C-alpha cells in the first residue's frame, strides 16, 4: 500500500469571473520512505497541490489518502515546510522548533531534548536563543525544516524551501537534506521549479503540465547518494526533465530556471 | 540630538510659566479667575500634603486600571471572534461600529440608573468608552495576520483556544498595541467625565469640588495632574511597551 495517494484531484480558481481548473485531475502515489520531487512551471499549482495534501485547502473533487485513509483536515502527520518559511517571529528559534511538540502536550524537558537534536542536525545550536529576524534566509529555512521534522510526520511536504537561497547555501542544504532523509528514512514530497534541485533530491521526479495541470511524466533517478548539484552524471536526467518542461513554457511566458 | 529636544522642551515650558507669571503681574484679570503659577503650585503642594491629591489620583487610577482591563479583555475577545467567524462580524460587527460612535459621556445616565452613584457605574463608563475601539483594532490586527503563519500553526496541530493564545494574539500583538493605546485614551477621557458627573471621589470629583468652592487654582492644579498622568502613560508606558514589542518581534 502506498504511503500517500492523491486521486483525481481537481481544483478550480476564479479568474476574470470564470472558474478555471488549476489542478485538473492529479494522481500521485508515493511509497513509504520515498523521496519524490514535483517540478512544474511557476503558477501551475504546485503550492495548491501541497496545500491540498496538507489538508489546508479543500479540493473541488478527488481525495487524498494517507496510509489508505482519507484525510479531511490538516495535521502534524503531514507537516509542510512553507515556500515563505512562515516562522513565528515572536518565538526564539528553539521555541519555533518546539511549537508543534508543545501543541501536542509534550513536556518541556522532552521537547528541549528533541529540539536540540534537530537544531544540532541543522547546525543551528548556536542560534537556539535567537529570534528569527536575526537569522539569514538560509538559516530561517533550516529552522522551518527542523520545525517540520520534529513532528516526525508520516510524510514531509516541502514547498520550494530553497528557492530564496544563494547557490552555495542551497548546494549545502541539498546535501544535508539527502543525509537527513537517509538518516530518518522519512517519506518526502518536495516541490520545486528548479530542475537541478529535483534531479539531485528525487528518487523519482514528477513533471506537471502547465495549467490546467496534470501529471505529465515521471522520471526515475536511480543514482547513488549523496548527489551533488554539479554531478555530471545527473545531466541526462536534467535534460530529460527540461525536455518535458520546455513544451510547457509558452514563448514569452515565465522561465523555469 | 535627544538631549537637544529635552533642552528645547525645558526652555519652552519655563518660558510658558514665566509668561503666565508675567500675565498675572499685569493684573488684567482678578485672582479668582486667573491664578498665578505659584498659587497653583501651592494648591498642588497643599493637596499633596494633606493626602487628598494622592487619594484622588489613586482612586482614579484604580478605576482606570479596572475599566481598561475589562475593555482590553472584552475587546480582544470580541475582536478575535469577529475576525475568525464571519457570522459574528456580519452581525455583532455592525453593532460594534454603531456603539463606537457613542461618546462615553453619553453612557453616564444609563450607568447611574443601572449602578447608582457607585464605583461600578464609573468603571462601567470607563470600560464601555474604550471597549469598542479595542474591539475594532483587535479585529483588524487579527485579520491582517499573514495567513501562512496561521496555516503553519494549524498544520502543526494548533486549533481552538490554543491557536488563539499561542498564535493569533502574539502574531497580532504589535498591531494590537495601537488599539490598547487608543483604548486607554478613550478610557481616560471617559473616566474623568464620569467622575465629574458622578461627583464621587477621584480626580474628576476634585475638579468639581474646585468649581463648587470657586477655587480656580485647584481646578487648574487638577487639570495639570490629569494632563501629567496622560502624558506619562501615553508617552512613557505605551511608548516603552510599543518599542519593546517592536524590537522583540523584529519590526523595529
Ligand atoms: N486562493 C486563490 N485564489 C485564486 N487563485 C489562486 C489562489 N491560489 C492560487 N491561485 C491560482 O492558482 C494558480 C496556481 O497557484 P500556485 O501558488 O499553486 O502555483 P505554484 O505552482 O506554487 O507557483 P510558484 O512556482 O510560483 O510558487 C495560480 O495561477 C494562482 O493565481
Ligand atoms: Mg508555489
Image (spheres, helix red, strand yellow):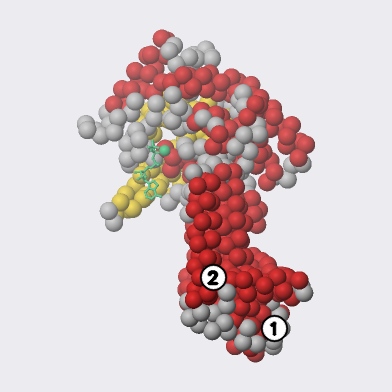
* Residue at figure coordinates x 36%, y 23% from the top left: A241
Most foreground residue, B119 or B163: B119
The residue sitting at the left extreme is: A251
Mark 2 surroundings within 10 Å by alpha-carbon count, few (fewer than 14), some (14 through 19), many (20 or more): some
Q: What chain does mark 1 sit on?
A: B
Q: Position of residue A242 (x, y in %)?
A: 33, 22
Q: Is residue B246 above or below residue B24?
A: above
Distance from the alpha carbon under mark 2 to that under mark 1: 33 Å
**Would residue A32 be seen by someone viewing this image from the given angle?**
no
Give the number of the disc on residue B53.
Answer: none
Chain letter, disc 2 residue: B
Residue A251 in sight here: yes
CB of mark 2 within 8 Å of CB of mark 1? no
Residues at marks 2 and 1 on the same chain: yes
Disc 1 residue lies near ligand 1 with CB under 8 A:
no
Please name the residue that numbered disc 2 is placed on: B21
Q: Pointer 1: what residue?
A: B200
Q: Residue B27, how many percent across, how many down? A: 51, 79
**Mark 1: few, some, or many residues within 10 Å (few <14, many ≥20)?**
some
Instruction: Kindly indicate the quadrant of the structure image that contains residue B128.
Output: bottom right
Which residue lies at the image location 60% right of the left edge and 52% below the top edge? Answer: B240
The one of A236 and B11 positioned closer to us in this rendering: B11
Amino acid at each position: 500500500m502506498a504511503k500517500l495517494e492523491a486521486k483525481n484531484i481537481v481544483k478550480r480558481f476564479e479568474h476574470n469571473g470564470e472558474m478555471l481548473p488549476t489542478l485538473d485531475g492529479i494522481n500521485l502515489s508515493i511509497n513509504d520512505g520515498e523521496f519524490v520531487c514535483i517540478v512544474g512551471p511557476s503558477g501551475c499549482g504546485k503550492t495548491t497541490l501541497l496545500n491540498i495534501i496538507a489538508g489546508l485547502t479543500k479540493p473541488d473533487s478527488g481525495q487524498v489518502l494517507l496510509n489508505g485513509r482519507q484525510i479531511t483536515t490538516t495535521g502534524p502527520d503531514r507537516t509542510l515546510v512553507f515556500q515563505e518559511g512562515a516562522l513565528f517571529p515572536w518565538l526564539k528559534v528553539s521555541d519555533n522548533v518546539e511549537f508543534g511538540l508543545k501543541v501536542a502536550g509534550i513536556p518541556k524537558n522532552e521537547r528541549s531534548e528533541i529540539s536540540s537534536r534537530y537544531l544540532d542536525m541543522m547546525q543551528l545550536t548556536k542560534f537556539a536563543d535567537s529570534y528569527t529576524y536575526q537569522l539569514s534566509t538560509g538559516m530561517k529555512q533550516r529552522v522551518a525544516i527542523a520545525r517540520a521534522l520534529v513532528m516526525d510526520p508520516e510524510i514531509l511536504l516541502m514547498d520550494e524551501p530553497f528557492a530564496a537561497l544563494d547557490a552555495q547555501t542551497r548546494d549545502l542544504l541539498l546535501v544535508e537534506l539527502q543525509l537527513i532523509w537517509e538518516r530518518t528514512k522519512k517519506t518526502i514530497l518536495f516541490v520545486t521549479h528548479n530542475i537541478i534541485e529535483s534531479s539531485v533530491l528525487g528518487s523519482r521526479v514528477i513533471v506537471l503540465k502547465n495549467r490546467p495541470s496534470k501529471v505529465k511524466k515521471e522520471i526515475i533517478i536511480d543514482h547513488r547518494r549523496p548527489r551533488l548539484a554539479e554531478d555530471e552524471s545527473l545531466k541526462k536526467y536534467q535534460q530529460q526533465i527540461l525536455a518535458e518542461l520546455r513544451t510547457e513554457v509558452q514563448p514569452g511566458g515565465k522561465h523555469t530556471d | 540630538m535627544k538631549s537637544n529636544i529635552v533642552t528645547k522642551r525645558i526652555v519652552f515650558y519655563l518660558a510658558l510659566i514665566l509668561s503666565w507669571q508675567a500675565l498675572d503681574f499685569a493684573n488684567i484679570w482678578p485672582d479668582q479667575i486667573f491664578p498665578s503659577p505659584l498659587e497653583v503650585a501651592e494648591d498642588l503642594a497643599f493637596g499633596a500634603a494633606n493626602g487628598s491629591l494622592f487619594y484622588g489620583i489613586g482612586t482614579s487610577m484604580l478605576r482606570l486600571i479596572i475599566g481598561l482591563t475589562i475593555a482590553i479583555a472584552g475587546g480582544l475577545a470580541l475582536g478575535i471572534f469577529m475576525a475568525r467567524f464571519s457570522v459574528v462580524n456580519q452581525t455583532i460587527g455592525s453593532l460594534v461600529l454603531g456603539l463606537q460612535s457613542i461618546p462615553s459621556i453619553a453612557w453616564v445616565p444609563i450607568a447611574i440608573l443601572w449602578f447608582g452613584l457607585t464605583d461600578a457605574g464609573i468603571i462601567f463608563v470607563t470600560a464601555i468608552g474604550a471597549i469598542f475601539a479595542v474591539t475594532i483594532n483587535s479585529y483588524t490586527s487579527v485579520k491582517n495576520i499573514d495567513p501562512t503563519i496561521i496555516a503553519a500553526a494549524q498544520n502543526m496541530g494548533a486549533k481552538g483556544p490554543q491557536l488563539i493564545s499561542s498564535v493569533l494574539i502574539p502574531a497580532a500583538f504589535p498591531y494590537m498595541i495601537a488599539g490598547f493605546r487608543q483604548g486607554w485614551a478613550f478610557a481616560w477621557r471617559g473616566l474623568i467625565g464620569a467622575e465629574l458627573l458622578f461627583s464621587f471621589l477621584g480626580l474628576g470629583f476634585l475638579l468639581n469640588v474646585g468649581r463648587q468652592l470657586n477655587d480656580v487654582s485647584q481646578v487648574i492644579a487638577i487639570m495639570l495632574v490629569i494632563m501629567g498622568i496622560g502624558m506619562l502613560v501615553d508617552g512613557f508606558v505605551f511608548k516603552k511597551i510599543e518599542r519593546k514589542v517592536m524590537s522583540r518581534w523584529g519590526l523595529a
